[in-house]
């Protein structure tokens, strides 16, 4: 797939995709005969991981280290484990916040449905 399609599928701007390539977070992408980048499903999954991490406040340095570890498990360090634990704690807080919002909205929905039925 071309860079524009990758951008649409992930919501990641084209300039940011190029930046991630320059930083090495995305590997060097193969190019077709016309010199255009040609992305694979593996590249799509990797970029989605990066985007999900960024959307949840992870620093690019940490994401890069997570990916390096995933690609080469011998790169595991206590520092990396500490970062994973920190982000897991943040995920739990986000989950609790989302649960609260869901409960609030579910209550409102039920009341609205009852009120609408009365009319």
Image (cartoon, rainbow, N blue to C red):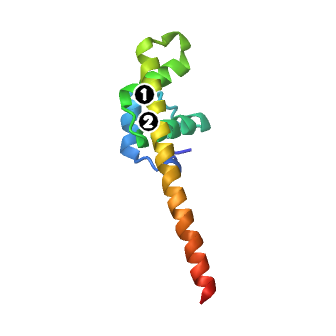
Circle 2 packing at 10 Å, graded few (<14), some (14-19), many (20+), is some
Q: Is residue 35 visible?
A: no
Counting from the top left corner in percent of width and height, residue 72 is at 54, 15
Task: Tell me whether circle 1 and circle 2 mark residues in contact (CB < 8 Å).
Answer: yes
Q: Is residue 116 positioned above or below 101 on the image?
A: below
Nearer the observer, 66 or 14: 66
Query: Which residue is disc 1 drawn over?
Result: 86
Count of picture labels: 2
Counting from the top left corner in percent of width and height, residue 22 is at 37, 30
Q: SS of the residue at dot 2?
A: helix
Residue in the picture at 56% in, 44% down = 1
Counting from the top left corner in percent of width and height, residue 97 is at 46, 48
The quadrant where residue 83 appears: top left
Residue in the picture at 55% in, 14% down = 73
Nearer the observer, 101 or 24: 101
Q: Is residue 25 positioned above or below 38 on the image?
A: above
Disc on res. 40: none
Query: Which residue is disc 2 drawn over?
Result: 90
Q: Is residue 111 visible?
A: yes
Nearer the observer, 98 or 63: 98
Q: In the displayed structure, does residue 43 sit left or right of residue 15? A: right
Q: Is residue 78 positioned above or below 26 on the image?
A: above
Q: SS of the residue at dot 1?
A: helix
Q: In the displayed structure, does residue 114 sit left or right of residue 28? A: right
The quadrant where residue 53 appears: top left
Quarter occupied by the C terminus:
bottom right
């Amino acid at each position: 797939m071309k860079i524009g399609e990758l951008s649409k599928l992930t919501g990641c701007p084209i300039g940011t995709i190029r930046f991630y390539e320059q930083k090495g977070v995305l590997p060097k992408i193969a190019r077709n005969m016309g010199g255009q980048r040609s992305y694979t499903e593996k590249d799509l999954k990797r970029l989605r991981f990066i985007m999900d991490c960024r959307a949840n406040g992870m620093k690019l340095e940490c994401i890069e280290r997570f990916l390096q570890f995933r690609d080469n498990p011998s790169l595991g360090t206590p520092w990396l484990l500490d970062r994973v634990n920190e982000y897991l704690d943040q995920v739990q807080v986000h989950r609790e916040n989302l649960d609260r919002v869901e409960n609030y909205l579910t209550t409102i929905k039920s009341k609205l449905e009852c009120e609408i039925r009365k009319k």
